Every structure is written in C-alpha cells, then in structure tokens.
Image (spheres, rainbow, N blue to C red):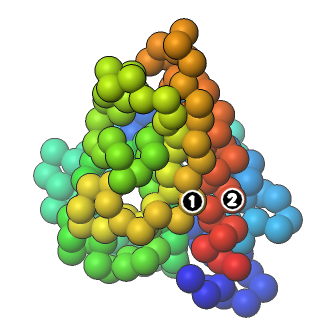
Amino acid sequence: MKKLIGLDKTKTAVFISGTGSNLKNLIKFSSEKNSPITIKLVVSNKKNANGLKYADRKKIEKKIISFIKPKKAEKKILTLLTKREIKFICLAGFMKILSSKFIKKFKGKIVNIHPSLLPKYKGLYTHKKVLKNNEKFSGCSVHYVTTKLDSGKIILKKKVKIMKTDTEKTLKIKILREEYNLYPKAIKKIFN
Ligand code: GRF
C-alpha cells in the first residue's frame, strides 16, 4: 500500500474483543516517531473487554458496539470511521466476522493478526489443534482481511519452535511475544 498521506500518520482504528495485549503494543508502536499510523479509535464489541483500559489510559476514543444486530453495528462503525477519517483498520483479537460489504468499503486497508502459520490452522483453537497434530513449529501471521476467514494475502509470518513440554498456555504466550514484534513490522512493511 502506498503511503496514504504524505507526512502525516495514517489515522487508524483497532478492533478488539478481549484482552487487548496487541492493542496495548500497537498503541506503544503508534506513538513512536517512525510509525506510519496513529491510533484514533478503538472499537470493541464487548463492553468489558480488558483492552479498553489501554484506550482509556492513552485517552484514545473508544466505542463499544454490540454485534447482536451485525448489520446495524457495522453501519454505526462505518459512520464513525468516516467521521474520524479513519483510513486503516487493525483487527487485534476481534472475534466477529465482518461482512463483505464492510470489507469492500475498506478494501486492502484492514489487516489482522492470527496465531498460526497461515494458511495452516485458520479459525479458532489454533494452539490446541497444532499440539494435537504434533506440529514441530507454529507461529503467527499478519494478513489482509478478505471475505474468507483468515485467508487474505499474508504480509508477514514468524515461526516459533514447539517444544515437547509446550502446552496450549505456554505456546500462546510464546506466540503472543512474537506477535508484538510482527504486527508493527508488518504495518511498516505495508506503508513503505
Ligand atoms: C492473539 O493471539 C491474536 O493473534 C488473535 O487473538 C489474540 C488476541 O490477543 N487474533 P490480545 O487480545 O491482543 O491479547
């Protein structure tokens, strides 16, 4: 993707549903001088998502939008994104599937991080499946969001070695640690 605006950072929204450790990391990254993005909005479909506290701490606007009626929810979000001139969206543990209509409006401008070496292990319970299959490696991938779950073009991946002693919990922690490097790196790659 070409730089969206000359010297200014690209106004970005992060969508979350839970813990928000990637959000925390992206907020830190966006405040760095050479980051191409500035986070202007955090959207959560859960009112008690832990990650919302990181938005509060940094006084970033947050919006809680229930997805009980997904069409209505997306409409509300789109209106807000337009108002705030958001040009880029990072999904970070966002547990809702966006409609093709929504994705088309932000074509090539929505990215996601997934805790597996895509195209392997799309969807949920990746660590459990990976361990069950006795994989030697797992990892994380940053990819463009398309209408097919976890299937858009991969921007960057990072491999992690699985030890015999690894459990779902240890693997999750190991991979998350890599996610914090990979997501900013992938964003830089997109904008350069
Ligand atoms: C991460 O493992 C990410 O890869 C996946 O959801 C998890 C979110 O974790 N999409 P957090 O909420 O950022 O801590």
Of badges 1 and 2, the one in the foreground is 1
Report x, y in % for residue 45. 33, 44
Q: Which mark is residue 89?
A: none
Q: Are marks 1 and 2 in contact (CB under 8 Å)?
A: yes
Q: Which mark is residue 185?
A: 2
Q: Is residue 146 above or below residue 167?
A: below
Neighbour tally class for label 1: few under 14, some 14-19, many 20 plus, Cα within 10 Å: some
Query: What residue type is disc 1 on?
Result: Leu
Label 1 and label 2: CA atoms lie apart by: 8 Å
Circle nearer the N terminus (1, 2):
1
| Nearest to the observer: residue 163 or residue 173 | 163
Residue at the spot 74% in from the left edge and 54% down from the top edge: 29
Report x, y in % for residue 166. 52, 15
As drawn, is 70 to the left or to the right of 88?
Answer: left
Mark 2, ligand 1, within 8 Å: the answer is: no
Question: Pointer 1: what residue?
Answer: 156
As drawn, is 71 to the left or to the right of 157?
Answer: left
Report x, y in % for residue 47. 37, 35
Query: What residue type is disc 2 on?
Result: Lys
Q: Is residue 27 above or below residue 191?
A: above
Residue at the spot 69% in from the left edge and 59% down from the top edge: 185
Which secondary structure, mark 1? strand
